[in-house]
Image (cartoon, helix red, strand yellow):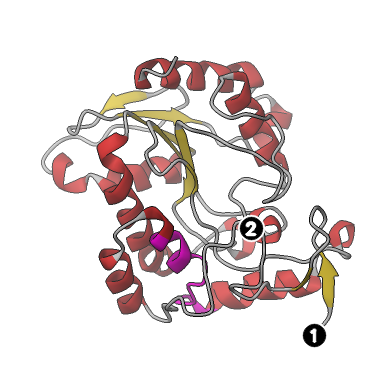
Amino acid sequence: MTTHAHPRTGVLFESPVPAGSGWPGDPATTETPVATNPGQVSALAAAATGIAELDALVSICGACPRLVAWREEVARQKRRAYADEPYWGRPITGWGSARPRILVLGLAPAAHGGNRTGRVFTGDRSGDQLFAALYRAGLVNSPISVDAADGLRTKQIRVTAAVRCAPPGNAPTPGERSTCAPWLDAEWRLVAPYLRVVVALGGFAWQAALRLVADQLAGLRKPTFGHGAVTELPSGVQLFGCYHPSQQNMFTGRLTPDMLDDVFSAAKARAGIR
């Protein structure tokens, strides 16, 4: 199989990248169990006892045949601009603190963004806007998010997605969303004791966040998504709505850098981060 050099480290990798081959930040090894159906996803996610273990399991999940085929096809064919780079071509884990005060939740990785770089919201226009805003808010150490070895760090937040594989047309099916849901459930279980705020990037992420606390919302009217919407969940965590920082939203002015800054400044204050 053809190999290409990682753009920062220079190490040669196949596309997709095999687990345990040395990709920066790869949490999995050749011994990490692989979920190949929804039942295995549920069982492995429920048994995970820490974020590192969960990330390893997520990063090699193979439970959705359509998504596996798509992410790997993209990794082999590539976009012309990245033809000489290796593509991660695997599911994307959450990134950031294992004890975050703020959780930033999106929909799914981009085919030539996270699916290429191996890190959520990295290497695409949405990630450029998101991490620039997080940097302006003082929540990460750099406004630049280009690859998994670029030195980006945080102590207060975790960024994750409801669906972990890049879907065709940015549209996972209801069945794929359901199969992937236990990974987010497990991540929530592990970080919820530390959280003060969830920022949902887009309406789907808002609904995914509400699903995490569905038992607490039973019989109550569900809050409606909107940019700048804020609702306090029964657990005491505040849910903030934010338009997704997509290229289209930013280009049309539906979402502006100032609007992003307002959301993350408010989230930071609510989380008690100085």
Residue 23, by quadrant, is bottom right
Q: Secondary structure at mark 2?
A: loop
Q: Secondary structure at mark 1?
A: loop
Establish if 121 lies above or below 153: below
Is residue 270 shown to the viewer in this render?
Answer: yes
Does residue 231 appear left or right of residue 245 in this picture? left
x and y percentages locating residue 78 in the rendered image: 80, 67
x and y percentages locating residue 231 in the rendered image: 29, 25
Q: Earlier in the sequence, mark 1 or mark 2?
A: 1
| Badge 1 amino acid | Met
Does residue 256 appear left or right of residue 155 in this picture? right
- Which residues fall within the magenta stretch? 53-65
Residue drawn at x 29%, y 59% as measured from the top left: 49
Residue drawn at x 62%, y 29% as measured from the top left: 141
Is residue 106 shown to the viewer in this render?
Answer: no
Query: Are the residues at dot 1 and dot 2 in contact (C-beta closer than 8 Å)?
Result: no
Q: In this figure, which residue is indicated by the disc labeled 1?
A: 1
